[in-house]
Image (spheres, grey):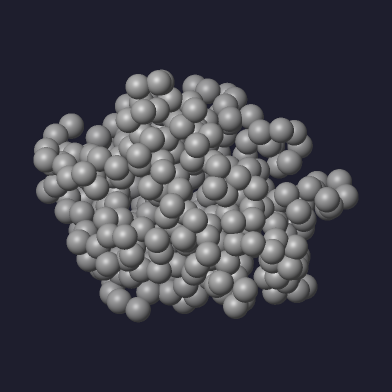
Amino acid sequence: MTPNEPCLLAPVVSIGIFAWNEEQALRSTLQSLVEQSIFGALHQRSSCCEILCVANGCTDRTAEVAAQLFAELAANHPHAPALRFRVANILERGKVNAWNQYVHQLSAPSASVLFMMDADILMHRKETMEKMFSTLEHDTQAHVAVDVPRKHIAHKQRRSLWDHLSLSASETTLAADGQLCGQLYCIRSEVARRIYLPKDLSACEDGLIKTFVCTDFLAHAAWPERIRVAPGAEHTFEAYTTPRSILKNQKRQIIGQTMLHVLVDEFLQSRPSADRTDLARFLESKDVAEPAWLKKLVGEHLKRAKWFWQLYPGLLSIRFRRLRRLSLARKIACLPATLLASGATLAASWMAYRSLQNGCTDYWPKAQRTGLQASYNPGC
């Protein structure tokens, strides 16, 4: 493929960027994306990659900004002949709907690997996506490859006490096996296309994907090795830094985890094997036949779970279980953050319980954050 020759090959890699009102952050994210080494590696193989910005329910100029940036990249990127750029402007807001449309309708059928990424992250290591792609190529047991998500405060030279507590809380989370961060991951396309996300799933789409992937669609107990961390791969995201935003994010996660528990543990696990043969088709048919079916199940669950700390098993204990995986020194260092985070979880679970009682499942607050800049140098 010569430098001026357009890519006529079918894409083998597809990258979906999910954006909701990210007009301000999108340029920085795309700048860090297009500097990734994966595009040069694919170009050398004479392979093609597509990049789609899936703007969903945006009320700002996200789609227009993406189209403008893609036009500039198509004209100037050194590996432009191996790239295709496209913007999909979806009217309905919500990452679940955007994910379904990208996987089942928008992404190239020829793509063997699908990258999913949010529109407000930065990849400061240029080999991140190439290493994730390589992990799936060389590890036949893995169905998903992830990197290590880093809070922006981890790169600060002078950290406050709050920063240290926040980073300690993250350390306990990352200690668990088979973690899937929805901000950035890649998945084998044949696996992704067997997944359909119910429209009311809300904020835990990555939890359902992880469950289906690690259990081979509920065929057995979880095998964490289905999700592999690519060595040396990282991305940076802007952490929540105010008590109010942290509580809102915790509330969102608890609502999502409650719905995941109701969907998988209480509903799907009790269905006959015929319904679980093709889970994507079964779940989509439920959405079509009875649009409010999942909300109805959650309402019935709340009648059984009489207290807000009983929304799902392990709601208050999970952080302490993760703490046990650390060395003694790290346990002691992370204990204050675990206690503080558990208190926040207790408060957020009460907030989530109240919202679910009122029938609110679509809770996705737009946090007021300062935004990351592509010129931000984490020192890596």
Residue 161 in picture, x, y percent from top left: 21, 44
- Residue 160: name its quadrant: top left
Identified at 38% across, 35% down, the residue is 335
Pick the residue in front: 66 or 259: 259
Pick the residue in front: 372 or 86: 372
Residue 26 in picture, x, y percent from top left: 26, 60
Residue 187 in picture, x, y percent from top left: 52, 40
Q: Is residue 115 above or below residue 171?
A: below
Residue 356 in picture, x, y percent from top left: 60, 70
Identified at 35% across, 41% down, the residue is 337
Q: Look at the image and tell me in which quarter the C terminus lies.
A: top left
- Residue 163: name its quadrant: top left
Q: Is residue 151 above or below residue 214?
A: below
- Residue 357: name its quadrant: bottom right
In the image, taking residue 213 as reference, residue 173 lies left or right, namely left
In the image, taking residue 112 as reference, residue 161 lies left or right, namely left
Identified at 53% across, 64% down, the residue is 350
Give the number of marks. 0
In the image, taking residue 273 as reference, residue 268 lies left or right, namely left
Q: Look at the image and tell me in which quarter the N terminus lies.
A: top left
Q: Is residue 40 visible?
A: no
Identified at 29% across, 32% down, the residue is 127
Q: Is residue 269 visible?
A: yes
Pick the residue in front: 282 or 237: 237
